[in-house]
Image (spheres, rainbow, N blue to C red):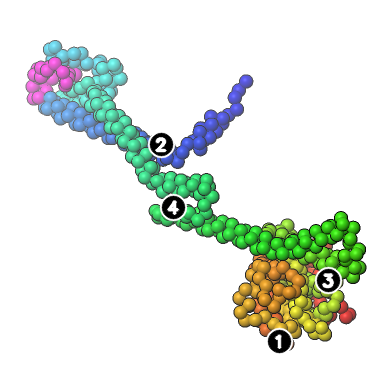
Amino acid sequence: MSRPTGREPRRLTRWWRRRSLRTRLTVIAATAIAVSVFVAFQVASELLDGELRDSAENQLRADSRVLATDAERAGLAHVQLPSYPGSGRLVRVILPDGSTRTPAGQPALPPVSEHAARVARGASADLMESNDSDEGYVVYTLRAGDGAVQVAHLADDSPVNRFGFGMLLIGLFCVVGGALVGRTVARTGLAPMDRLTAAAVRVAHTRDLDAGIPDEGGGEIRRLIQSINDMLAALRDSRRAQRLLAEDAAHELKTPLTSLRLNVELLIRLDRRGTLDSALPAESRTRLLNDLGAQVAELSTLAAELTDLARGDVSDENTELLDLADVVVAAVTRARSRMPHIEVALDVTSMWVSGRPAALQRAVLNLIDNAGKWSPAGQPVQVRLRAEGASAVLEVDDAGPGIDAADVPRVFDRFYRADSARALPGSGLGLSIVQRVVDAHGGRVAVARSARGGALLRVDLPAAAPPDPIARLTAGEDTAVRRPRPCRDPGRA
């Protein structure tokens, strides 16, 4: 059964990925040096071998010319051949009849080759050839008189071998040195990363987000440290905001819960004594129960608003292209059902925006609820929606006393309530939710004094191009659901 192909490369890849960055740099440095030394050895060996071969061949040619000159002067049969020194150069004379002469005591050369015989017969002037026998002779044949002379030497690879052995030792030394240098460079270069890792681990263990990571190094390390410090700052702000929200929520919940507990304990104590009817007349009992209902409603509203704030920008609602006029009309309808004693004057024009309809409706409803608390009887809350440049502008104003200049900077803070508003129902979260929703939609909200002397709250949202009616029909959208239309007062239509 054959094994699947490609398994070994995958194992090697997994092994490599499990190695530390320091080990990878060390291996890469050692490998690079080893490859460089090997390539340099190959190139140098070829150059050295070629240089030695050219030098030996040139020496053979020079010796052959000297011997050929002597042979032409004294004759091939009578020329004085140099005695064999015991090693190195070998000589031979090829006579016209094909026989040969060699110095006494000289080792026998390989038989005369066919190509060398042709030189002796005058077919060519010279010939350089290598013998393939075990001795490995290099023989140079030169035409001389009616024959030829030959000078040979034994091919010697020992210089190249000695050079290769030396290069091998140098290569091993360079590889070991390269590994050590790579290890040192990796340790030095990754020292900021080690300190960064230690600082991150310390923050994770101690949960101390105030302990920033020291800014050191440069380039990528510096940008990484700055990014982590920015992340820690964002987490620090988020945790501080959560802590403040919890503290403010506990403070705001304390009063209604205490009042609710006291009233419930009073009812329970009177009921256990059997004096509920005598101690609390029907009118007082009704008033107490109404107070309990109001306190429960206030707690429910506060809990819903706290949940909305705690979720922040997290929402399952999708962003879509919608007509803001439809959102405002829906919010006004809900406001009238919740506060039937408040009159709302509506003047809206179709304005398309990109946003989350439920969140926007909640923001508009909070604006109307806030204005309804201050609007005196007979003075309607005015809600206007119009285009202004590239923005959709929503204005909600009332004829109340307005907002004091000292309270304007904090009017959108969570749980903030002006001194004049502490006796009114509410949690102080409504306008904070408005600002969060508007910020999430890329808009801005501001407060000013209206022409009637009350508060004017203005919301600017980026306007969007209205959809193509043909494209909407092609997509199957019901154009009657969010159709653009001017509307003056749906409550009076």
C-alpha gap between disc 1 and disc 2? 78 Å
Q: Which residue is mark 1?
A: 453
Residue 60 located left or right of residue 277: left
Earlier-in-chain disc, 4 versus 2: 2
State whether residue 288 appears in this view.
yes
Kind of residue indicated by mark 2? Val
| Mark 2–mark 3 CB contact (< 8 Å) | no
Kind of residue indicated by mark 4? Ile
C-alpha gap between disc 4 and disc 1? 58 Å
* Observer-nearest of 97 and 69: 69
Earlier-in-chain disc, 4 versus 3: 4
Residue range (magenta)? 70-95
The residue lying at 26 percent from left, 17 percent from top is: 135
Quarter of the view holding residue 437: bottom right
User: Which is in the foreground here, disc 4 or disc 1?
Assistant: 1
Q: Which residue is mark 3?
A: 338
Q: Is residue 75 magenta?
A: yes
The numbered disc on residue 221 is 4
Whether residue 328 is situated above or below residue 220 in the rendered picture? below
C-alpha gap between disc 4 and disc 3? 58 Å
| Residue 402: percent from left, percent from top | 69, 82
Earlier-in-chain disc, 2 versus 3: 2
Quadrant, the N terminus: top right
The residue lying at 33 percent from left, 33 percent from top is: 176
* Observer-nearest of 109 and 3: 3
| Residue 49: percent from left, percent from top | 26, 30
